[in-house]
Amino acid sequence: MIETRELVKSFEGFHALDGLNLSVPAGAVYGLVGPNGAGKSTLIRHLTGIYRQDGGEVTIDGQPVYENPAVKARIAYIPDEIFYYNQASIRDMKTLAKSEFPRFDEARWKALGQIFELDERAPMRKLSKGMQKQAAFWIALSQRPDFIILDEPVDGLDPVMRRRIWSALMADVEESGTTVLVSSHNLRELEDVCDHVGIMKSGKMLIERSLSELQDNLVKIQLAYPDGGALPEGLEILHQSSTGRLQQLILRGSAVELQARIAATNPLFLDLVPLSLEEIFIYELGGVEHEIANEVL
């Protein structure tokens, strides 16, 4: 399990993380999302032991991460910008990884070579960003980590390679119980692979739940009333729009309960539509106004 408790980090008086609590269950695929500047990358640098916190705790399986080589040896981390030594080849970076990660698996390295189809002798600096990402995944998955932490992991990869990488990651989760935390702006892709989601804002965890719980707590409803018909009182309406008689509502609450309450008011038409993770993200952060403000900025 990956956990933070009341995590605080400041830079020149600015609170990048402000009492943040995070809990990633063992064996989960956890999607970390939030607007730009929410503190996601700062959080990840604490989870990987790069930053030392100003306050609070950062633990993996109950052990502190910072300056703890035994814990770090269980973590594979792929940042948005891949690190490599300027003159290093893929093989050189693999050799470095073998020296730092005792569970590095040569047999897996050879098997994964069939997926990535890269030349081990190729200098990292001469590879495209997408090929550097492939090399990073090749090395990371060969480490046989217990925890994989990813920051915009498939940015720059073509659709075929994205699918291959996600398939390899999901196989590790299923077969080895690997825990994966992934930060990405591609919410549609996260929706396909994540079973838990944390939404950050202003250095805090706004909401943290399983994806199914998130989807059960926000409901999109389309309905139409005859003349004189009206919604029941006491609904928590996050958004409401209409075209003629047809209304569209985003409501907070249980889908089953909301459908029963609204059906009791005898609408002419009533339909519940599942929300995407992107829609949940928008409405949890303040609704359409937040979306429009981001587009203008």
Image: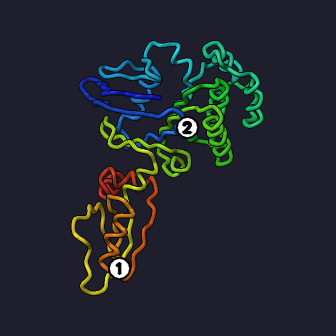
279 above or below 270? above
30 above or below 234? above
Q: Amino acid at mark 2?
A: Pro
Q: Residues within 10 Å of mark 1 (few under 14, many from 20)?
A: many
- The image position of residue 223, as x and y in percent, is 36, 76
Which residue has dot 1 on it?
224
Of the residues under marks 1 and 2, which one precedes in the sequence?
Answer: 2
Q: Amino acid at mark 1?
A: Ala
Which residue has dot 2 on it?
153
Q: Residues within 10 Å of mark 2 (few under 14, many from 20)?
A: many
Closer to the camera in the image, 194 or 164: 194
Q: Is residue 175 left or right of residue 21?
A: right
Residue at 39 percent across and 72 percent down: it is 222
Label 1 vs label 2: CA separation?
43 Å
Q: Is residue 144 left or right of residue 247?
A: right
Helix or strand or loop: what does disc 1 sit on?
Answer: strand
**Corner quadrant of residue 123:** top right
Residue at 66 percent across and 16 percent down: it is 98
